[in-house]
Image (tube, rainbow, N blue to C red):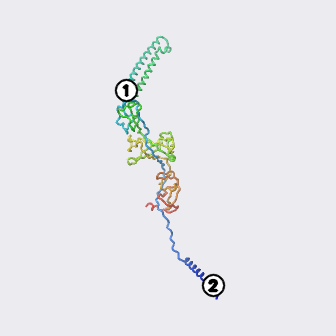
Amino acid sequence: MKPTLWQSTRRWLLPVIIVAAGIAAATTMIVLRPQPPSTPTAERVVPVDVIRVTGTDMNINVSSQGTVAPRTQTTLVAEVSGRVMTVSDKFVTGGFFSEGEVILQIDPADYQVAVDQAQANLLTAQAQLAQERAQADQAAREWDLSGRPRENAPAIALRTPFLREAEARVLYSESELSRAQRQLDRTTVRAPYDALVREKLADIGQYLGTGSQIAEVFATDYAEVRLPLSDSDMRWLTLPKPGQLLPADATRVTLYATMAGKQHHWQAEIVRTEGVVDSNSRMHYAVARVDDPYGLRGNNNLPPLSAGTFVNASIEGIRLTGVFDIPLEALRNGDQVLTMDPEQRLRQRQVNVIRSEADRVYVTEGLNNNDSVIVSPVAIPIEGMRVNPDAGQS
């Protein structure tokens, strides 16, 4: 017997009703389930190190370096020939001489003879001149006795040519004596200035010809250091113009060098610029002078600043106002710093960096007095994130 229509419909409708009822029950349970209590997410706090900054007036110093060199160096040579008779006990490499002090003596015997001969010739010429003057006076009186005007007398009658010849002979003899005396004086070799002997080239018993080298010496009154400067360095300095020497307001320089494991410093000043740019390095050069580098005047307790010493230099630059001096590690991306506001939240600042050094940065814009600048690393800085300076300092 065939199933009725109702029986067929009931057979497939019943599973659908059961599934729908299950879905409705599950939905009702999800909607009506109790909600768990909500807890707010804890805000991230980053520990930092901060420093408080204040703008100040300061000189922007420029760093450079160079080698100490004597201001004057001279090769002493013999101006006369002869055997070296005596030398000074100070005439050794490294010996000091005051200006005019005797270094060595060349045998003066032959030159003394020349002086004596020149003096004898001068005395003879002076005697001849006196004789010619007497004869000229006698000739003039005889001409006057003739009753004729003296201005009409011929020169030979008044012995004028003979008188002029005698006068010329005296002048020649005087010049010969002066030359002989100079030659004699040159047998004594003296220090041309306060000097140190760099190299000794002659000694006692040695025969020196004219032009033979005696010693290399250099001045000790002051030394010079040639300091290279870049174009960016020049903007911060007030330097003498090329050709201008010893300006009244010379720029001050501090020279540093380490000796025997201890750092010492000497005061110097810029006295001139060279006025040329090195074609290879594109550097300008200024020359610093340091007085009494060997301490010979006894006015300091510093060790000698010997020629050839390599020194670092700090050159005093122009004075600026409102400059913030911050550590290099505080600078990010070349022109940004991170600060902490009064609510201890991070703020990013754009700054104007005017100069940077090995471990310092100088800023003129972007910071205010008493700002707290973050100097410790922050991995992912987010504007407004909370920071904790106490945790960073602990």
Measure the C-alpha gap from mark 2 to mark 1. 159 Å
Q: Find disc 2 in the rendering and name its residue.
A: 8
**Label drawn at residue 110:** 1
Foreground of the two, 249 or 114: 114
Mark closer to the observer (2, 1): 2
Foreground of the two, 16 or 105: 16
Check if mark 2's residue and mark 1's residue have beta carbons within 8 Å: no
Q: Helix or strand or loop: what does disc 2 sit on?
A: helix
Left or right: 4 in relation to 94: right
Q: Image point 42% across, 24% down: which residue? A: 176
Q: Helix or strand or loop: what does disc 1 sit on?
A: helix
Left or right: 306 in relation to 8: left
- Residue neighbourhood size for the residue with mark 2, other residues' Cα within 10 Å, grouped as few (<14), some (14–19), many (≥20): few
Kind of residue sitting beneath label 2:
Ser
- Quadrant of the frame with the N terminus: bottom right
Q: Position of residue 129 (x, y in %)?
A: 42, 19
Residue 141's place in the image compared with 247, above or below, is above
